[in-house]
Amino acid sequence: MSNQALTQSIQQALSQLEHAYNPSEVENGMYQNWESNGYFQPSYDSEQSFSIALPPPNVTGSLHMGHGFNNAIMDALTRYHRMLGDNTLWQPGTDHAGIATQMVVERRLNAEGIKRTDLSRDDFINKVWEWKEESGGNITRQIRRLGSSVDWSRERFTMDEGLSNAVKEVFVRLYEDGLIYRGKRLVNWDPKFQTALSDLEVENHDEKGSLWYVRYYFTDKEVTTLEGNNYLVVATTRPETLLGDTAVAVNPNDERYAHLVGKTITLPITGRIVPIVADDYVESDFGTGCVKITPAHDFNDYEMGKRHELPLINILDAYGNILAEMEVYPDLQTREPTLEATPTDHTGKPYAGVERFEARKQLIEQAKAEGWLDKIEDYALKAPRGDRSGVIVEPWLTDQWYVAVEELAKPAIDAVENGDIEFVPAQYKNMYMSWMTDLQDWCISRQLWWGHRIPAWYDEEGKVYVARDEAEVRQKYQLADDISLRQDDDVLDTWFSSGLWTFSTLGWADENDDKRVLETFHPTSVLVTGFDIIFFWVARMIMLTMHFIKDKDGKPQVPFKTVYVHGLVRDGNGQKMSKSKGNVLDPIDIIDGIGLEALVEKRTSNMMNPKDADKIAKQTRKEFPDGIPAYGTDALRFTFCSLASTGRDINFDLKRVEGYRNFCNKIWNASRFVLMNCVDKEGNAQTIDQTANADVWELPEKWIISRLNSTIANIHKHFAQYRLDMVSQDIYEFIWNEYCDWYVELAKASLNDDSVSEERKAQIRYVLLHVLETALRFAHPIMPFLTEQIWQTIAPLLNAKTCESIVTAPFPQVNEGQISPQVEADMAWLQELIAGVRNIRGEMKLGNAIRLPVLLQNISSEQSESLNRIENQFKALAKVDSLTIVAEGEDVPLSSSSMVGQLRILVPMKGLIDPTAELARLGKAQEKLQKQADGISRKLANESFTSKAPTEVVQAERDKLAELEGQLKVMSEQMEELRGL
């Protein structure tokens, strides 16, 4: 490049970095350019592949901090592997989110005075699709705003035709394999939405309730308790369910009731005679040690009922009202129940048709009136509520579709046991294994309209036929056209379709998709997820994938090789973020900023209680008096990655974001400084070497190049370990503390020194640019926008722009030959010496303009050799006028001092300092050192420490104490000299 062209390039680069760092200006339009140029699409030109499936967010949802956290982690991994040259795919998509989306659309219709049931099923589904088209792009726009480099050309939606076909294919095959069946089981039932819920859709709330103690009288009048009572007292939190009781249970080791096992009691109200059974599940210290068993309305009772072969009596309808006739099932194989008339109360008021909680009040009044209510106690309980409806969920006996999981679970367990799938951190393997070894069959049907409709049809007699569509049903089962068929009204659990996510999104069961995609990118490399859905999603993906996807040898294929588990994002005080607490942060607000009133409105707009809204408003105004400033995407992403210590919850503090916003600014300003040092006062380009010439390097160049390569090695190691927090630390430490604070300052001194040759200055400029360009590339996976902007200005100056974008630039590789422990040790000592002199300057309040005489005492022979190598840099950077080695036993003038290990740095005081002030300074320093020495002495005096700690640890403590005692001795002597003045 000619000098004129170089001058032009530098001036253009400076103009692009002319203004102060403004993230919105830097980021504006950059992502669209990346996407339109296809940088995020796989290349298929490398044998090494890397792929991640984006955990699909709800299509109508909005980004929250958890999304921001895992997107930052996934994008850092994806960009890193893309820059390594791997054939890289980050597969995006969204989930149809059955109940959540249906609820949103129903709410909108209700606002227009329309109920869902006013519409046909098809008309309602069309309304949902309209809503999806209207708002479904919101979350994908926000994902783009985070800089996530997903391949949007392959975006998928769980209700797409291809994925819907995959869902039907899996259902039919599992049914044909005998692994899907329809049966009557107990489920979490939401009476508001009239649908079954998964455990993940049920939230347990701490609430104040009551414990009712009721008397159950023995059928045989001759039977009594040890106390002589002709009844048992049973404690319950749900007295209305006694209408469905089929037993009373006690612990077999409870001596109070041992003689009663096998006897019977007669239930109040119904008059039903039920047995007293013994079961280990019963806790003798709960209530009276006697519990009522209602197998059709309690999950634990259901299991006890199976153990004791008890009948199940359903007392509720789908709305949570008492049935007109209670349904009695002798066992779960019985399809049609016998009916038992629902009684009236003591006043003749019927229970039939009464809402469950109203029936509770009615029943308690009857118990009081008839004398079988023993007492009532306050009781703290966990109330199970639907996460969408907010109502108490009811364990309810109903016909549902199930996946038989025992056969599917075995290979899924083996895959983790034998290491085909690795959990990071490793402790989550134990959580996974504990779940997988105690599985229940999976209820997959939901009573909704929005979702994948179950591919099952019924004839008029109720016989079920399963196939991919009705035409296939008639062909498969040879049914005539005049036989009327009705498709099952239920839809599949959302987790069923998302359980196929890693392979259904890659074209499995889709004849139109590129077959290379599934072959190349499955199994995926890593799944990034929170620990809370290891069972609900991760385990089911493993089970379903291994059943359907086989490698070339027919061996079951895992969905991913690694499961990276991250913690939850909490607020700065460690509290869970929730709208009710008013501590929710929106990642887009952190990126773009938001004014105070807009933030208050956002946090309080959907609050029903005015007092709560007022409380949150006050809290917000106190916490954010000026709103939230625009920190930019890179600062937010760097914050997330810096907190990503595997598996731990993170406490998110905006002060950290502010700190990393300052880091972005530091990089920006350092880049401007480097460019400005590449031109002379007239703006003409100075000579910049295009290649390294180590022959003219001195310690600073050798050191920064060594540190650069050591940092690259650490970054590769920490990426391999999924330690994004350590990667962030590597980047921050190198760029801020080593490159900006030290090398740039060393380079500046040399470039301004007329005695330094032009040949060396040309190399210094090369090293400045080369190290910066390399650091931009290794920082890019975490800070994509800032690094792209600066790289585009720096790389051309070194002819290093081998591609159009840093996105596809090669990730830096380690040059082991440039790593020198000796150079790094010399520089570390130089830094300590400079820091020692700077401490004396600061404490003596001496300006930087004064060049100081420095004495070094107690210097070792090894340190003397090192001093010969660094003396010139030490004098220049510490602004030392003269440097003298004090011989052993030689007297020194009264001096201010600083210690570097056993080495004593002295600056003679004569004409420089006030003895009184110096005595005060040394007194404070002595107090600080004495506290450290006392702490170590106490530790060494503790026999528990010295006997249990490793020998090398104890010796290290003794060495440290000896060093501190030596420093204290020297300090005391110096203070004595000062006092004599």
Image (tube, rainbow, N blue to C red):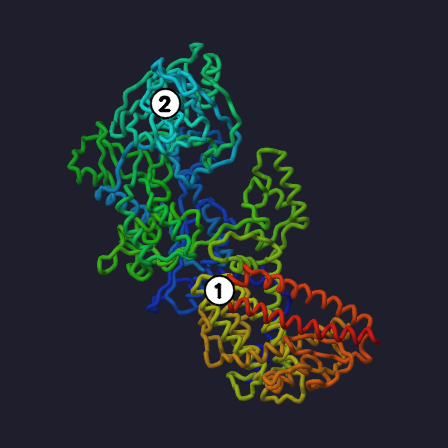
Residue 672 image position (x, y, % from top left): 62, 72
Identify which residue, 448 or 321, lies in the foreground.
321
Residue at left offset 57%, top offset 70%: 735
Q: What type is the residue that disc 2 sits on?
A: Gly
Residue 327 drawn above or below residue 542: above
**Residue 754 on image: x %, y %:** 67, 88
- Percent position of residue 604, x then y: 60, 40
Q: Please name the residue that numbered disc 1 is placed on.
A: 781
Near-viewer residue (104 or 846): 846
Instruction: Give the image location of residue 404, x and y in percent.
Output: 28, 41
* Direction from residue 903 to residue 257 in the image, left or right: left
Question: Residue 189 — which label?
Answer: none
Residue 977 picture quarter = bottom right
Q: Nearer the viewer, residue 509 or 953?
A: 953
Answer whether residue 794 is visible to the viewer in this image: yes
Quarter-of-image position of residue 902: bottom right
Instruction: Say which residue label 2 marks.
Output: 244
Left or right placement of residue 284 versus residue 885 in this view: left
Identify the residue at horizontal 43%, vertical 44% (top origin): 132
Q: How far apart, in angstroms, are the residues tagged by discs 1 and 2?
A: 60 Å
**Rendered-image quadrant of the C terminus:** bottom right
Secondary structure under the numbered disc 2 in the rendered image: helix
Answer yes or no: is residue 509 visible: no
Residue 838 vertical placement versus 192 (above, below): below
From this view, report whether residue 846 is shown above or below residue 502. Answer: below
Q: Residues within 10 Å of mark 1 (few under 14, many from 20)?
A: many
Q: Is residue 393 left or right of residue 871?
A: left
